[in-house]
Image (spheres, grey):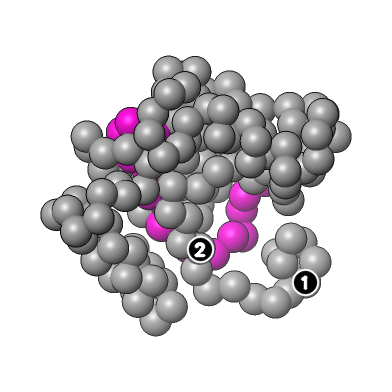
């Protein structure tokens, strides 16, 4: 919206396991219906709260609300997108990173193998790695050095 509305200028996007597609169609969304922390039922509730009941998956959802619907991603700032293997959001996150790359947006995709949504296992090595990766990506991005 900032790009299309003339500002403010954004220098970087950090998209940590983002929820991007209200249609809930990717295979990972169908496969992970009962995973801990985040699953398809949680995504349904989240989208219904955000968009209003009975709007999720309809044609009138704006790409500003559900970025996976956007047809033109060109001119967006560099991005870092993270995804986790056992996360219902995995496939939409990977697809969005690919779409950004195809639109010539400098994009880093980080996939965490063997991890549920966000890697939320307190004080685990993978949680520490995800936090360190996030901080490093934000530092690079905000310094204008996104990969």
Residue annotated with mark 1:
6
Q: Is residue 84 magenta?
A: yes
> On the image, which quarter does residue 67 sit in?
top right
- Residue at 24%, 66% (x, y): give it: 132
- Which circle, 1 or 2, is nearer the viewer? 2
Q: Quadrant of the N terminus?
A: bottom right
Outermost residue, left side: 125
Residue indicated by mark 2: 13
In the image, residue 95 lies in the stretch drawn in magenta: no
**Helix, strand or loop at mark 2:** strand
Number of residues whose C-alpha sits closer than 10 Å to that of mark 1, classed few (under 14), some (14–19) or many (20 or more): few
Answer whether residue 36 is visible to the viewer in this image: yes
Residue 94 appears in view: no
Quadrant where the C terminus is found in the figure: bottom left
**Which range is magenta?**
72-87
Quadrant housing residue 143: bottom left
> In the image shown, does 109 or 124 lie closer to the viewer?
124
Report x, y in % for residue 141.
Answer: 41, 72
- How many angstroms separate mark 1 from mark 2 (CA)? 17 Å
Whole-percent x, y for residue 46 in the image? 63, 41
- Figure check: 87 above or below 66: above
Q: Is residue 16 left or right of residue 76?
A: left
Q: Nearer the viewer, residue 46 or 96?
A: 46
Seen in the picture, residue 27 relative to 102 is either above or below; the reply is: above
Residue shown at the point (26%, 49%) measured from the top left: 121
Mark found first going from the N terminus, 1 or 2: 1
Number of marks in the image?
A: 2
Q: Please provide percent x and percent y for residue 4.
A: 76, 61
- Looking at the picture, tell me which residue is in the foreground, 21 or 2: 21
């Amino acid at each position: 919206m900032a790009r299309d509305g003339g500002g403010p200028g954004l220098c970087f996007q950090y998209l940590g396991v983002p929820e991007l597609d209200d249609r809930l169609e990717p295979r990972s969304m169908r496969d992970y219906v009962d995973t801990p922390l985040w699953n398809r039922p949680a995504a349904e509730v989240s989208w219904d709260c955000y968009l209003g009941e009975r709007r999720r998956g309809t044609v009138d959802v704006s790409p500003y609300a559900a970025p996976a619907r956007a047809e033109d991603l060109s001119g967006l700032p560099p991005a870092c997108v993270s995804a986790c293997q056992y996360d219902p959001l995995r496939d939409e996150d990977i697809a969005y990173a690919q779409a950004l790359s195809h639109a010539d947006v400098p994009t880093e995709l980080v996939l965490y193998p063997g991890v549920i949504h966000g890697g939320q296992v307190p004080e685990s090595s993978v949680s520490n790695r995800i936090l360190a990766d996030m901080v490093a990506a934000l530092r690079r991005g905000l310094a204008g050095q996104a990969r």
